[in-house]
Amino acid sequence: MPLGTNRRLDRANNIADLRRLARRALPRPIFDYIDGGADDEWTLARNSTAFTDYELIPDVLTDVSAIRTATSLFGQPVSAPVMLAPTGLTRMFHPEAELAVARAAAKHGLLYSLSTLGTTRLEDLAAAVGGPKVFQIYIFKDRGLTAEFVARCKAAGFHGLALTVDTPVAGNRERDRVNGLSLPPKLTWKSILSFAAHPSWSLPALRGSRFDFANVSHKVDALAAGPMSLFDYIGGQFDRSLTWRDVEWLAAEWGGPLAVKGLMTAEDAKRAIGCGATGVMVSNHGGRQLDGAPAPIDQIAAVRGALGDGPDVICDGGIRRGSDVIKALALGATACSIGRPYLYGLAAGGEAGVDRALTLLIEELERTLALAGVIDVAKLERRHVRARRNMAY
């Protein structure tokens, strides 16, 4: 990596700085794929701004000379209550792809989740990177493909599954439609100019591995015929007929830690646990599916109240600061899941950029704990946070 890149990363003081670096590094269609959401992107924006509706209430005159952030997630010990969310098509953002992200996560002792629609085979990632790992899974129309994933994850030593349930159809991601995003990228005259203006991205992309869904391309080789719309692929593979019976089937097939990702209500959370899940990821898919859905942080307290103390409750979406994590934990979350923050780092500087993103968040988390007068994430309580606008929680 060029020395100038390291210097730029060192000057990044927060996730917003890494986002600016990513925007400079990527062609516009690729950056928009990370940064965009569905329809008017109201939910996308709300995911982050909702955290400002909560205030932290500190304790004082507490000995905070030793701060403890370690916890467990999916039954695995982790150094902090932060996990790296599954994100598809990661090779589009940097040629090191998922391996760079997983290596950075392992360095920090954090849990990494590989996406079904990732660009690295799950076996290759498991062989190359230690640390706790979860595989994000869909139940496809071809149930045999889903069963195959379960068997492969068992053989590769993955520690858990995260079942995404909020994609019966693809969200209306208008930025991608405008940019004509496809696999491989479909060049229009407008996008050609953007790709040409970013040779540090374009040249490695042309020389490197092809952009494909590495874990499913052996079964669904739809890319062979030429550029294919992401919307067409998703629409063709996802099953609108899924029900809670399918969750029961997957829980029995897997037999290990399983989180249902994409639910937003206490009622659905209880049903997920009743169907065999061990946890839930409260998520609106990063604002990329149903625009108008509430922010995950606003749902955490109700979900935790419905589930009690046992199951994992993961707040997935909108995290930009370590203080956001603390607010979610005080409301009842076990941990928070981040996607865009580490992708900004990846685009800005590969593995070193992801490392910088994680370092910033963990430093902020530890500093916020100290300033709040709490020595251990396990000691955060509801009294440490309150709603600013008379919100019920």
Image: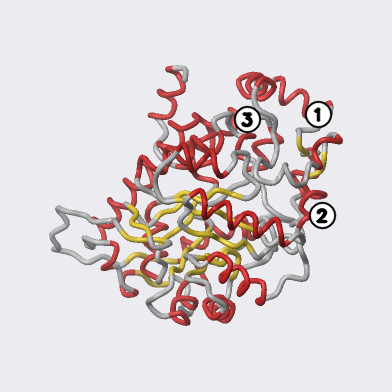
How far is mark 1 from mark 2, CA to CA?
23 Å
Q: Is residue 214 left or right of residue 63?
A: right
Residue 171: x, y in percent?
Answer: 74, 57
In the picture as drawn, the residue positioned furthest to the right comes out as: 225
Q: Say if residue 56 shows up in the picture.
A: yes
Residue at position x 72%, y 20% from top? 196
Report the disc number at residue 187: 1
Looking at the image, is 169 positioned above or below residue 124? below
Sequence-first tag of 2 and 3? 3
Residue holding disc 2: 236
Q: How many marks?
A: 3
Q: Residues within 10 Å of mark 2 (few under 14, many from 20)?
A: few
**In the image: residue 351, left or right of residue 207:** left
Question: Residue 55 placed where, x, y %?
Answer: 38, 65
Camera-nearest residue between 256 and 96? 256
Residue 166, percent from left and from top: 67, 64
- Label 3 is placed on what type of residue? Leu
Residue marked by disc 3: 26
Callout 2, which amino acid? Gly
Q: Nearer the viewer, mark 2 or mark 3?
A: 2
Give the secondary structure at mark 2: helix
Say which residue appears at 32% left-offset and 60% top-offset.
Answer: 71
Q: Specify which label sits upstream in the sequence, 1 or 3.
A: 3
Q: Nearer the viewer, residue 169 or 301?
A: 169
Which residue lies at the image location 63% right of the left edge and 72% below the top edge? 249
User: Dot 1: what SS?
Assistant: loop
Q: Quadrant of residue 369?
A: bottom left
